[in-house]
Image (spheres, rainbow, N blue to C red):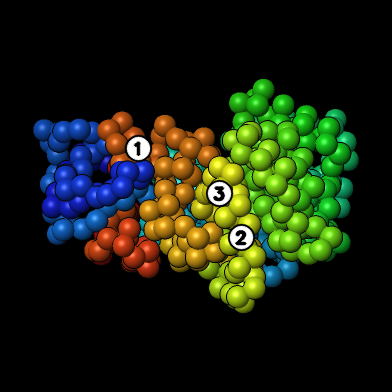
Amino acid sequence: MSNASYRNLSYWDGFSDQFRDADIHVQAGIFTADAATDSIGRDMAGGFAIPGLIDAHVHMCLNPKISDPLAQADADDDQILEEIRARALAMVRAGITTARDLGGGAWLELRIRDEIMRGDTPGPRLICAGQPITSVGGHCHFWGGQASNTEQALTVLARQCEHGSDLIKVMVTGGNITPGSTPKDSQFEDEVVVEIVRESLARERHVAAHCHGTDGIRQAAAAGVRTVEHCSWVGDTGWGRALDENVVKMLADNKVWVSPTINAGWRRFRKPEFVDMVRENYRRMKAAGVKLIASTDAGIPNVFHHDLPKALPEFARFADLTSRETLVSATSDCADAIGLGSVTGKIETGYSADFVVYETNPLEDLSVLEHPQLVVVQGREQYTT
Ligand SMILES: [Zn+2]
């Protein structure tokens, strides 16, 4: 890792309204106000820099080309580790410098997390949940985190901490990819979710709650989880049709972030009535003060780990966000939500030197995000055209 000064560019800090023309200085992997005496100068030819992108919901161990989740287990650990390394490299090359992994069965992604932190493997900074807590036979039960009551849930939770998980994931409702699991229904009594959050916080870990059904969103919001994943408002009348204003208010009051996992695959849902319904849900959440963060659920069928740049224009469209709002949700806000708000997500003195340079201004056109020229993660240059 060398000290460097990136000149002849303008940069957006991750939260303000516009780009500024100024050099970026990096020393020992951190943004600094001035150049180091041994700083290497880099001419960026009038490029546009923004903080590295953050995906709040990925599964590093899942192969998006395999549609049956049970068939994922056919590969051996060494093969999966190699695949995770390849995914990590593709992610940084795409401009993703941080990602939050929300579940796997064998803690393999934690091993790669540590390799990346040591500088042995190129990739984004990862924070990892390990095995999600789920009900017996519930959503993603095949990952090993099954529990039928509070005591068993806390046993699964303790096991994740022993394995070095950075946060706790809980499947509050059923999901799509698990046969026999129904997205609408809650998997636990209220009390279990409350105890999971209490114990996680006591162990200084956030909780990310998978919730499709409205009742599960209510349970998670009331218990004070950090993020609600998907937040699909599923009820008896179907997908997206059961938004409850009282629950929206609870999300806002308890400062729960919503991570809607809108990926490039959402293009196929672009029937006008679906877009209108989803937009209305996000409009009501936004009006109540609920904040959204960028996430893709990468690893599920056909959602690739490096696809966040492709997903962000879809996210903007479905959630009715400006380009600036979209980029805030994928940088400074996303870092805040996942507990890294004082570490990354901003181009500011003292922050980790995580940034991406593009030829044209992404605040004017998000499609530029698919073509980064240079990606720097923790001061390491990962990709230059
Ligand atoms: Zn997921």
Q: What residue type is labelled 2?
A: Glu
Residue positioned 20% across, 33% down in the render: 33
Q: Residues within 10 Å of mark 1 (few under 14, many from 20)?
A: many
Query: Of marks 1 and 3, which one's residue comes earlier in the chain?
Result: 3
10 left or right of 29 in image:
left
The kind of secondary structure element at disc 1 is loop
Mark in front: 1 vs 3: 3
Q: How crowded is mark 2: few (under 14 residues within 10 Å), some or many (20 or more)?
A: some
- Where does the image place residue 245, in percent across and percent down from the top left? 70, 47
Q: In which quarter of the image is residue 274?
A: bottom right
Q: Do the residues labelled 3 and 2 touch (CB within 8 Å)?
A: no
- Whether residue 167 appears in this view of the structure is no
Q: How crowded is mark 3: few (under 14 residues within 10 Å), some or many (20 or more)?
A: some
Residue assigned mark 3: 286
The label number, if any, that marks residue 280 in the structure image: 2
41 left or right of 49 in image:
left
Residue assigned mark 1: 352
Of residue 335 and residue 58, the one placed in the foreground of this image is: 335
